[in-house]
Image (spheres, helix red, strand yellow):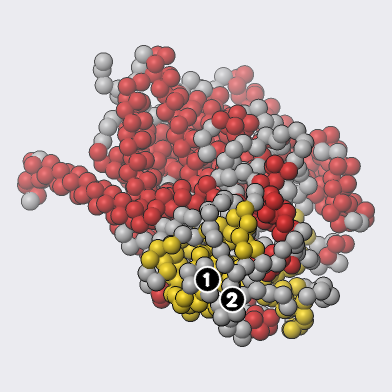
Amino acid sequence: MAKPQKPKGPSKPTRASGDRPLIPQKYQHAAAAALLVLSLMVFFNQVIFSGKTFVAADTIASHSFDTLLKDADASGVFPLWNPYIFCGMPAYGSLTITGDRWFDLSYQVFSLVLKGGSALLMNPSGGWVLVLYVIFALGMYWFAFTKLQSRVAALVSALAATYSMYIIIWIMSGHNTKIAVMAMFPYILLALDRLRHRFSPAVSLALVLTLHFAFVASHIQMIFYIYLAVGLYILFFLVRGLATKGEWKSVARTGAVFALASVIAFAMDSDRYLSTLEYNPYSIRGANPITESLSQAAPTKSVEGGLDYDYATSWSLAPGEMLTFLVPSAYGFGSVPYSGILSRNQEIRINTYFGPQPFTEAPQYMGIVVLVLAVIGLIAHRHDPFVQYLAATVGVSRFIAFGREFPVLYDLMYNYFPTFNKFRVPSMILVLVQIMIPLLAGYGMITLFSLRDRSMPPRTDARWKYVLAGLAFLFVVSLVASSAVVGIYEIFMPREEAVTFFAGRYGNPQVASELYRFVTELVVGDVRMALALLLAATAAMYYYARQKTSLTFAAGIVLLALVADLWRISAKPMEPQEQRGLEMQFTAPPFVEFLQQDSTQFRVLELVDGQPQTSNTLAYWRLQSAFGYHGAKLRAYQDVVDVVGLSNPLVWQLMNVKYVVTDRADSSAGLRLVFAGGDRYVYRNEAAERRVFFVDSVAVAGGLEILGNIRSQQFSATEVAYFLEDHGLEIDPPGPQASATISEYGLQSLSVSVRATGRNLLFLSETFYPEGWVARLDGEEVPIYRANYLFRAVVIPPGEHALILSFEPRGFALGKNLSLGANVVVLIGLAGVAAQRLRKRSASPGGAASS
């Protein structure tokens, strides 16, 4: 069989005589790259030039552990455990934080690239994230050019993808690991496409590195979407090759190379992922809730080892929300500036979204100009296999994004596709749509360019004029008769639904009516701008096709229309703040300064409006919280919250909650007010137990029975410890001389001086996690038992002893060695490829002469 040849891309746009390029051809790639970088600098000018930053909940959550990282570095330990939230949990395995991965040699080089790029951008806050956007934009341009062979069309694709709402908003929301993963996606597609046409060791090694850099960011859901897109790519071209008796062998080879590259890339990141694989069976994403056995209702759709179905699908995109692809404010938009009755005419930022999702900051908008170009590209190039693949990926992604709102495809994936049921937010998969649609838009530009190559028949000319006249008419109507636009909008979005929603949220019919009017104004503005931009872009391409204007002018108008469309919408949720805004989040409030005076080991439970505060900021001040914020907490901890709750005094005892911090006065029994300042009250729990103490006896019970006994407070913390299994232990009640004192409390180690009067059971108010915690009594390893469902216990024989518990997960130790070895292998491979190319160059006549 003949070796498959690389197909030619779409034909380049021809130029009329005298249509000289604004920039000489040999500089056009550099100019396009410079334009992409410059556009990002202008869009984020407040961050780069004014020293501002984004202060989102996820940004604050990540900075909360800055102190932990500093302490780990000062102690010379890699931060594997986090003692500051949820009574302790794996830090590295839960993808919360990371340390200095010195053994990952290739990523050390990549980190220097990020730091160097940030320096070129004048080291703004989060500069490394902006560099990742640059890498993504350049990758989109490079890949699009290889497919389209047109610099302008490639620039359209790159700009459209970079400023798609769901992609550009990540930095504003603090979702930095998403762009860290997806920045590599264009390069992965580029490597696949090249390998499908011709095998290359250099491209294969480049594929390994791009996969590795995507893995490092550790946003597993985004990585899954990359693999889904790659799987569709290989499957599509394999089936097509078999059906047409074409290039199926080269596709199969590409799939094998990709699989091997994935294995090597995984090895390079195995310290992280082996830790995660250890953690997963114990997290809410790997184990089912114990509360399922409480329900007598019909079985839910939840599957073994996956997230609860309702939780997993809580951010499903309703089919009707696809209207926001055209009119971004159709469902109220999201976070927008507002002034009116609700704010007493002062400008504030409110969320006006009223769709079926719990909330959203912004719609999944890709640009009206981009969408029209994509439709043109799809229709004109529908026989192109790659275009067919793009369309298929868009279709699959869209149906998965519907989630429970239209679960035809989602439920199949949830029930049968490996790992899929561990992810939440079905609408997140639309990131693939916001990459594939811009690529289709590039094909649309190629189609419009080709119109100049042929004479325009009168009928076609008339159609262009009809379209222009129609757009102009609709634009004028939107200006002079906005009520007509609102009337059409209300056909799709009845007024009653929105008003009822706003009335329920704000409890004021007058405010609800005003907010609906505010939304309709946004909709009218969207429609006007869409029509104006489409009119400008269409007119420019019409006059270009009629050879009445140059390619430079027409392309410039289309690019300006595209950028204006996307920037107008993508800038709405952007709210950069002065650096001091972020710094103020970590300025110790008075209640923190009070708590820091207590040098004993204790935990804090912070309540806001009577509910536990989903925040990790206490960790910044080295205060350990009984609660916190994480998307994949331990299942055992969540079971305690679900069955018992965190307002239970016995839970407070078991969790070593010494202080309860609230935003309102509390007269509950057992709580004594010890501090009031600012907007917080601090109460001391008079029944608080120490972090370690002896327990009188042991009993065996099932998980629900244990949690039920805690909920009903049928025992005291020192009376009995419940085990899930019968270990055949004989326990003596501690005598008066028994004692246990923490001699050293490290980030991931604990030393206790104990004196036992018999075979006593020592209870430790620390989360039980079997994958890594080791107990040594006088240097000899002893078992750690799971006590009272969530905590640890160790049997202490008579006498005085030194007990040391340390976190030593095997997955990390093995993964670190694998990562170092895989890095060495890849770097040797790269050196070999470079040496081979140098030899070829020196052996060539030109090379010999030059040497």
Frontmost residue, 455 versus 722: 722
Q: Is residue 92 left or right of residue 493?
A: left
Q: Is residue 537 left or right of residue 525?
A: left
- Binning the other alpha carbons within 10 Å of mark 1 as few (below 14), some (14 to 19) or many (20 upward) gives some
Image height of 483 relative to 631, above or below: above
Residue designated by label 2:
735
The structure residue drawn at horizontal position 56% and vertical position 64%, both measured from the top left corner, is 731
The answer to whether the residues at label 2 and label 1 have Cβ atoms under 8 Å apart is yes
Q: Which amino acid type corresponds to the residue marked 2 in the rendered image?
A: Gly
| Percent coordinates x, y for residue 26 in the rendering | 32, 45
| Percent coordinates x, y for residue 650 in the rendering | 71, 66
Kindly state the secondary structure of the residue where label 1 is placed.
loop
Frontmost residue, 87 versus 75: 87
The structure residue drawn at horizontal position 73% and vertical position 78%, both measured from the top left corner, is 686
Frontmost residue, 49 versus 177: 177
Kindly state the secondary structure of the residue where label 2 is placed.
loop
Instruction: Point out which mark residue 310 bears.
Output: none
Q: Which amino acid type corresponds to the residue marked 1 in the rendered image?
A: Gly
Question: Quick check: can you spot residue 179?
Answer: no
Residue designated by label 1:
758
- Binning the other alpha carbons within 10 Å of mark 2 as few (below 14), some (14 to 19) or many (20 upward) gives some
